[in-house]
Image (cartoon, rainbow, N blue to C red):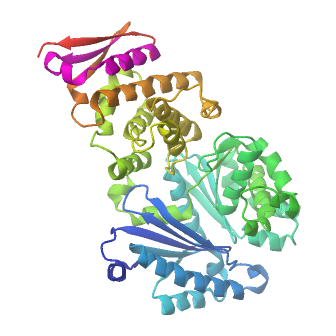
Amino acid sequence: MSNISSDTEKTKPGLPSGRIAVVDIGSNSVRLVVYDAPTRLPIPMYNEKSQCALGSGLGESGVLNPDGVKCALRSLRRFVGLAKSMGVATLDMVATAAIREAKDGPAFVEKVKDTLGIDIEVLSGEDEAKYAALGLLMGVPDADGVIGDLGGGSLDLVGLDQGKFSKSSTFALGHLRLSEVSDGNPERAREIVGETLSGLKWLKKVKGRTLYAAGGSWRAIARILIDQTSHPLHVVDNFAMDAEAARNILHLISGAGRHSLELIPGIPKKRIETLPFAAAALEGMLIASRAKTLQFSGFGMREGVLLTALPSSLQNQDPLISACKTMVERTGRFALHGSEIREWLAPLFPDETDAEKRLRYAACLMSDIGWNEHSDYRAEHTFMRSLRIPFAGLSHPDRALIASTLYVRQGGDMNDPLIRPILGLLDMGQLAWIRGTGQALLLAHTISGGAPDLLSRTELEVTKEKIYLCVTKKDRAALISDAVERRLKSVAKAFGKKSKVKVLDD
């Protein structure tokens, strides 16, 4: 970890402090990610990658690819300069399998130290695997099964028991390495993965559980699977599918020629050469583990490194709720707090689970994010923004639930063709929840105008047949309007009840 804040302050006075950058020097690529920190789930502000292929030919030569070294040094100079200009206070530079295994890896580390003044942390295979697991756990705290993180040089595995670390292993089975040891034959690469993992006793315990896939090549494959299965949400993080169905498509990808892969939209050309080997590795992992479900993670080793750089007070926060709060603090219109709306709505949800309450709180926090959009497009833009927002801790059904709720809150129609495909991810109970919660959020903002301390001067009372909006005589004229009464009626209808304004004595 290197502190570059003093240089940053001289370069760009007045920039926000606390930004963190992670530079990942991998076997295939060198990447800079700058995070807007400190928050529990810092959002990437900037992301740049150079495809240097440091580990190309490493298996045979034992040394780093000379052209890759030149590319990496050139990229690192740029990345350090960018980080300083962007107001980065802390820069973590980590290296993985290629630098770890190459004879000239230490010389590369020393060269970077001499020329840039930055220390590189060379991760062990075990550290690399555990950082990847930490990245996954940022969004899936109860992950159960095994995470596999595929890089260019290595495949790193960590067993997970309801969010707790179990056994870990690392193998020289990265997609670059596999292409070399298999003599360019993806079918042979799949066999090599199977043969290697067959002796891993702890992996057999994953049977019937989940394989979590991380790493850039596997995320590229996730995009293909999303497209091939006509999945309605094009978000890699937490995309899940049946393992057997995934194996069938992975087998086709591993056997596809370059021309066929080039026809697939969204796949970087520099990944095409080794994509069949990444597919073969994933298929081999599924066969060896006998996992029931394949789930992809948009968070991995870099996010794990980032998490360890944050104060413990932030590490222990719920990533979804923390991210929602941070977003509202920076872009909110007024000071109406999500907790104020959440407590006001509570009488409508007497039997909700903790998981349901968490999602309702997230919806309350984000319920006004479309305030600065054009009124004709506010519902649509709110829906698209919340559906694809880069927050951890959301399954695809969770995303559909929150985004559709906010769409209704902004006056959107659930029969609109825009959201109908997404609603297919939900069950009938969740659809009813969307109607009721969305209408209730709309009522809350109609009463308060989004301003604080007004909503709490009213309260909801729910009986078997009616929903009452209770208000004192003194506040009735200020808080109750025709629009409020219409929206109260819509809330009651969504819950299968009648509505009434109840005026209380002061």
Q: Residue at x 39, y 50 (%)?
A: 327
| Dominant secondary structure of the residues highlighted in magenta in the image | helix
Tell me where residue 46 appears, x and y as whole percent: 50, 66
In the image, 478 versus 151, the foreground residue is 478
Tell me where residue 454 appears, x and y as whole percent: 22, 31
Residue 485 at least partly seen: yes
Tell me where residue 103 appears, x and y as whole percent: 66, 88
Find residue 19 and report its image quarter: bottom left
Q: Residue at x 45, y 76 (%)?
A: 83
Task: Answer with left or right where residue 116 lies relative to residue 460.
Answer: right
In the image, 60 versus 421, the foreground residue is 421
Q: Residue at x 81, y 70 (%)?
A: 179
In the image, 10 versus 185, the foreground residue is 10
Magenta stretch bounds: 467-494
Decide: is 405 above or below 87. above
Question: Is the C terminus in the top left, top right, bottom left or bottom right quadrant?
Answer: top left
Task: Answer with left or right where residue 132 lies relative to residue 478.
Answer: right
